[in-house]
Amino acid sequence: DAGVIQSPRHEVTEMGQEVTLRCKPISGHDYLFWYRQTMMRGLELLIYFNNNVPIDDSGMPEDRFSAKMPNASFSTLKIQPSEPRDSAVYFCASSLQGREQYFGPGTRLTVT
Amino acid sequence: AQSVTQLGSHVSVSEGALVLLRCNYSSSVPPYLFWYVQYPNQGLQLLLKYTSAATLVKGINGFEAEFKKSETSFHLTKPSAHMSDAAEYFCAVSERQGNLIFGKGTKLSVKP
């Protein structure tokens, strides 16, 4: 079975540009999570969805960040405009009935 | 409120020695508990989970963890470390469907 798929795996962009990260959860899973991981702050939950509906976005750092889940098999995390402090690895995870989560390989974002 | 404390941000063992990674949790209800492993440049992988069945849980790669309610602990052990076990390990707790609360992680180094 395919796991969680994320694209791109690496993204390098200049400050001020729009960045869109993509995630395809495991088929049949009803929860989707977006995390950010940095050396300084560790693993942070940004937002999660249940049945495509955002449940908790309290971890989204600023209005520059937005996330959508238009259907059960696709989600995006957008940063506009991007800043150097957004540089991090962004993970998407999915779960069935909100228990153990399965993580994607991550997107390494570098903002110069 | 639920929380997780991992004692020791770095643990170093010799190859063949016992691995013990400590995790204490705080939860107002019987929790679900998890251990995840993250190898360099990869996403988090589920190692094992406790879901109120047997208190001794066996996971992948020879790891196991024991749930001790009286000590609010869920320590991870492996009898004999391999070089391939070098990674970062995260403990996580869930009280309800949806969110997992992760510890800050413990980096395990294995010396030859």
Image: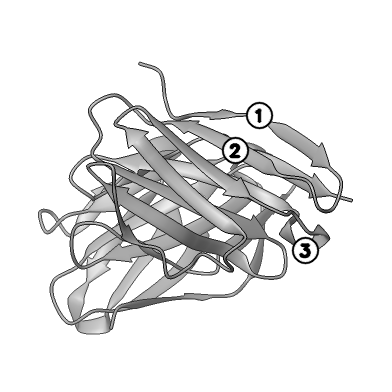
Q: Nearer the viewer, residue A28 or A67?
A: A67
Q: What residue sits right under mark 1 in the picture?
A: A8
Amino acid at pointer 3: Arg
Residue B14 lies, with reference to residue B1, above or below; the image says above
Look at the numbered disc 2 and give the secondary structure of its residue: strand
Q: Nearer the viewer, residue B56 or B3?
A: B3
Q: Residue B17 at what x, y percent from top left?
A: 58, 54
Tell me what residue is drawn at x 72 percent, y 58 percent.
A86
Q: Residue B89 at what x, y percent from top left?
A: 53, 55
Position of the N terminus of chain A by quadrant: top left
Q: Which mark is residue B101?
A: none
Q: What residue sits right under mark 2 in the picture?
A: A21
Q: The disc numbered 1 marks a residue on which chain?
A: A
Q: Is residue B102 visible?
A: yes
Tell me what residue is drawn at x 47 percent, y 49 percent.
A67
Alpha carbon distance from label 3 to label 2 = 16 Å
Q: Residue A91 at what x, y percent from top left?
A: 54, 45
Q: The disc numbered 2 marks a residue on which chain?
A: A
Q: Residues within 10 Å of mark 2 (few under 14, many from 20)?
A: many
Q: What residue sits right under mark 3 in the picture?
A: A85
Q: Quadrant of residue A81?
A: bottom right
Discs 2, 1 touching: Cβ within 8 Å: yes
Residue A90 lies, with reference to residue A1, above or below; the image says below
Residue B68 lies, with reference to residue B108, above or below; the image says below
Amino acid at pointer 2: Leu
Amino acid at pointer 1: Pro
